Image (tube, grey):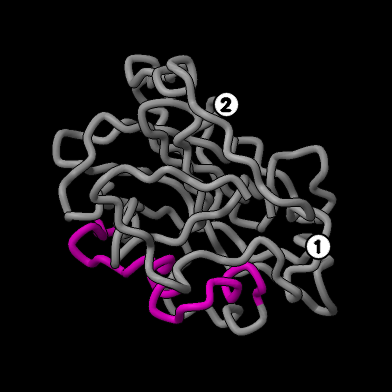
């Protein structure tokens, strides 16, 4: 492996924060993980500065997944909010946060999704927003349903929302998943359990937030995303649609 020239002051993530590239319980990682030594490619100005999806392209309403195609999505309406923070707890403003998820029946709007739950004509499944000056973000959506997959017998994915966070360029994109508290399917989900450190694993679980819950309208959940350091959110090594 090519040695990595780390900048001064860089603090490595604590052991057990991120899942291994090859995890026996998550069957498809056997085909995806690298089998040869990694080579670090030097980043040139192009990779460090662009292309960058500027926040001026985020349109009003893209933070609301419940209204798509001229109608209102079916399901338990929820508000998911939080902050994007660096390793010292400082807010990260003007950062593009994207989400994608299954609908309330557990089905993605994707040609490869053959789960026979119905598609919701008013739920597209994707949204984006740029963080505010205090690093905050907020989405309105519906709680995604659990769905089966073929990883192992009687395998079901817990309810989750995929998150993507961009830095200054596409090469700095980080991808992770947010779960909901007290999900009964955690025990058998290899993606959730591939994170070795139990405390790091829990940092992928949102908290019910009664302050963000609105009477007769939506339940609230809070989830902060920490980019680095002792409290870092576990991130995936590559985008994963499961």
Spatial distance from mark 2 to mark 1, Cα to Cα? 39 Å
Q: Position of residue 122 (x, y in %)?
A: 59, 36
Q: Earlier in the sequence, mark 2 or mark 1?
A: 1
Vertical placement of residue 73 versus 151, above or below: above
Identify the residue at horizontal 48%, vertical 52% (top origin).
142
Identify the residue position indicated by label 1 in the image.
30
Q: Report the mark closest to the observer, 2 or 1.
A: 1
Residue 204: mark in rendering: none
- Near mark 1 (Cα within 10 A), the count class, few <14, some 14-19 or many ≥20, is some
Q: Is residue 13 visible?
A: yes
Q: Position of residue 39 (x, y in %)?
A: 64, 41
Q: Position of residue 217 (x, y in %)?
A: 32, 53
- Near mark 2 (Cα within 10 A), the count class, few <14, some 14-19 or many ≥20, is few
Identify the residue at horizontal 61%, vertical 84% (top origin).
187
163 and 49: which one is in front? 49
Q: Is residue 71 left or right of residue 50?
A: right
Identify the residue at horizontal 44%, vertical 72% (top origin).
15
Identify the residue position indicated by label 2 in the image.
69
- The question of residue 225 being in magenta is answered with no
Total numbered circles? 2
Q: Position of residue 65 (x, y in %)?
A: 47, 39
Q: Which residues are magenta?
A: 189-217
- The question of residue 216 being in magenta is answered with yes
Identify the residue at horizontal 23%, vertical 43% (top origin).
136
Vertical placement of residue 154 versus 150, above or below: below
């Amino acid at each position: 492996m090519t040695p990595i020239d780390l900048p001064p002051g860089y603090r490595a993530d604590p052991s057990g924060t991120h899942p291994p590239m090859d995890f026996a319980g998550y069957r498809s990682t056997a085909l995806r993980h690298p089998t040869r030594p990694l080579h670090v490619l030097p980043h040139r100005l192009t990779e460090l500065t662009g292309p960058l999806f500027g926040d001026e392209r985020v349109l009003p309403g893209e933070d609301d997944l419940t209204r798509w195609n001229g109608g209102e999505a079916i399901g338990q309406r929820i508000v998911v909010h939080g902050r994007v923070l660096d390793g010292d707890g400082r807010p990260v403003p003007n950062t593009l946060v994207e989400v994608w998820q299954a609908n309330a029946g557990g089905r993605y709007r994707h040609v490869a999704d053959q789960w026979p739950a119905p598609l919701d004509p008013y739920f597209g499944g994707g949204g984006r927003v740029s963080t505010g000056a205090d690093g905050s973000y907020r989405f309105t959506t519906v709680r995604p349903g659990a769905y089966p997959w073929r990883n192992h017998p009687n395998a079901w994915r817990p309810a989750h929302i995929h998150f993507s966070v961009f830095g200054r360029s596409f090469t700095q994109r980080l991808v992770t998943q947010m779960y909901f508290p007290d999900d009964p399917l955690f025990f058998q989900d290899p993606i959730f359990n591939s994170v070795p450190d139990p405390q790091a694993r829990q940092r992928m679980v949102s908290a019910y937030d009664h302050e963000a819950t609105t009477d007769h309208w939506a339940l609230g959940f809070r989830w902060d995303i920490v980019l680095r350091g002792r409290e870092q959110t576990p991130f995936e090594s590559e985008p994963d649609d499961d």
